[in-house]
Image (spheres, rainbow, N blue to C red):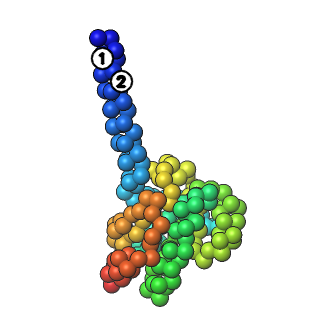
Amino acid sequence: MKIKTNLIISLVLASVATFLIIKFMNKNTTSAPENPFFSSKLVDLEGKIFEPNQLKESVFVVSYFQTWCSDCVKEQPELLKLENHFKEQNFKVLMVSDEPIELMTKFKEKFQSQLSFYQLQDPIKSIGISRFPTTYLIDKNGVVQEVKVEGINWYTPEIIEKVSKLLK
């Protein structure tokens, strides 16, 4: 009888633990803050203040990244292709990290990135970003139209069509 009771308790505990693990994993891989960009304090790689509100009425992508993140490296060529595709149409891609400017500069040089890099003045976790890259497509009204957490495929026919419509 004691073995049967211990077996039932073990199964219940294992079920609860499995449920909690799955719930925790799903929350972290798919969730992203609503839109932390316009309240962010940013500086460019030269240390000049960048005012996010100057992008109001623009369509743009902002990617929150870390230099150690392999998916962030993989995402860069996709974002550059997207930016180049719409370069004549007031479309911009911004790379944002809370890491030191020197580290971001080395990263940009190492990967010969032509994208614009900015340092977030607050810890990136303070704005709710915990998975990298977390990337947003934002419309002219400042509304998020697409968000990808750990997603690297940005130069797709679907995204190109979406950006084209947003730029009209």
Whole-percent x, y for residue 59 in the image = 40, 75
Could you tell me residue 38's position as x and y percent?
44, 62
Give neighbour class at mark 1: few <14, some 14-19, many 20+ (Cα, 10 Å).
few
Q: Quadrant of residue 147?
A: bottom left
Q: Residue at x 45, y 76 (%)?
A: 155
Instruction: Count residues near mark 2 (Cα–Cα under 10 Å), then give few for <14, some for 14-19, many for 20+.
Output: few
The amino acid on which the numbered mark 1 sits, given as a three-letter code, is Lys
User: What is the quadrant of the N terminus in the image?
Assistant: top left
Question: Does residue 100 appear in the picture of this structure?
Answer: yes
Q: Front-most of 107 and 141? A: 107
CB under 8 Å between callouts 2 and 1?
no
Which residue lies most toward the top here?
1
Which numbered disc flags the more N-terminal residue, 2 or 1?
1
- The x, y position of residue 36, in whole percent, is 43, 57
Q: Is residue 49 visible?
A: no
* Residue nearer the viewer, 80 or 123: 80
Query: Which of the labelled discs sits on residue 4, or is there none?
Result: 1
Describe residue 155's horizontal placement relative to residue 119 as left or right. Answer: left
- What residue is rendered at 62% in x and 60% in y? 67
Residue corresponding to mark 2: 10
Callout 2, which amino acid? Answer: Ser
